[in-house]
Amino acid sequence: MNKIEHIGIAVTNLKAAGNLYEKLLNTTVYKIEDVASEGVKTAFLQTGPNKIELLEASNPDSPIAKFIAKKGEGIHHIAFEVDDIIAEMARLKNEGFVLLSDEPKKGADNKLVCFVHPKSAGGVLVELVQES
Ligand code: ZN
């Protein structure tokens, strides 16, 4: 894996959280995107070389709604950039990690993504990200 691509943070209100993180990081939200397939609305901020993805549930069945009901707002996942998501998924599967999908999915920011189940990754939801 190349580097941390972004950190995902679950929030209840994208607008309010966007304002908060703009103040905190002294930067601006540069993109807002609806990822209907995942039931989330996302906002991106950049600070130096690093990206923060804010995630708000867009429906009650969204994984973000379930996460917030269980754990409250906060860090939701860490995304790592990979060159070849198919090869990386195969490697992780071989190593015994549990992937949340058999195929890469279209994620926010025009990327191909796949999640690794937190139960197999030390309690952390890990996202693989490849530029598409
Ligand atoms: Zn993400």
Image (tube, rainbow, N blue to C red):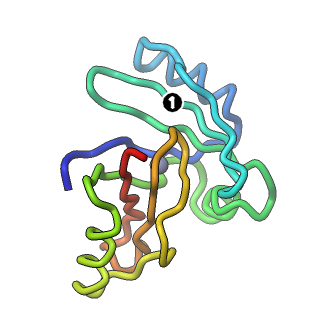
Structural crowding at the residue carrying mark 1, measured as other residues with C-alpha within 10 Å and reported as few (<14), some (14–19) or many (≥20): many
Residue ID at (38%, 45%): 131
| Residue 75 shows up from this direction | no
Front-most of residues 88 and 62: 88
Q: Is residue 63 above or below residue 45?
A: below
Front-most of residues 38 and 77: 38
| x and y percentages locating residue 64 in the rendered image | 64, 56
Front-most of residues 1 and 85: 85
Residue ID at (31%, 30%): 50
| x and y percentages locating residue 130 in the rendered image | 36, 51
Q: Which quarter of the figure is the N terminus placed in? A: bottom left
Going by the picture, which residue comes out furthest to the right?
A: 60
Residue ID at (27%, 70%): 87
| x and y percentages locating residue 114 in the rendered image | 44, 64
Front-most of residues 39 and 75: 39
The image quadrant of residue 71 is: bottom right
The image quadrant of residue 27 is: top left
Query: In the image, is the residue at mark 1 within 8 Å of ligand 1 by its beta carbon?
Result: no
Going by the picture, which residue comes out furthest to the left?
A: 2
| Residue 112 shows up from this direction | yes
Residue type at tag 1:
Phe
| x and y percentages locating residue 19 in the rendered image | 60, 19
Image check: 55 left or right of 34?
A: left
The image quadrant of residue 16 is: top right
Q: So how many labels did they put on this image?
A: 1
Q: Is residue 74 above or below residue 60?
A: above
Question: What kind of element bears circle 1?
Answer: strand
User: Mark 1 sits on what residue?
Assistant: 44
Q: Is residue 129 above or below residue 18?
A: below
Image check: 61 left or right of 77?
A: right
Image check: 117 left or right of 68?
A: left
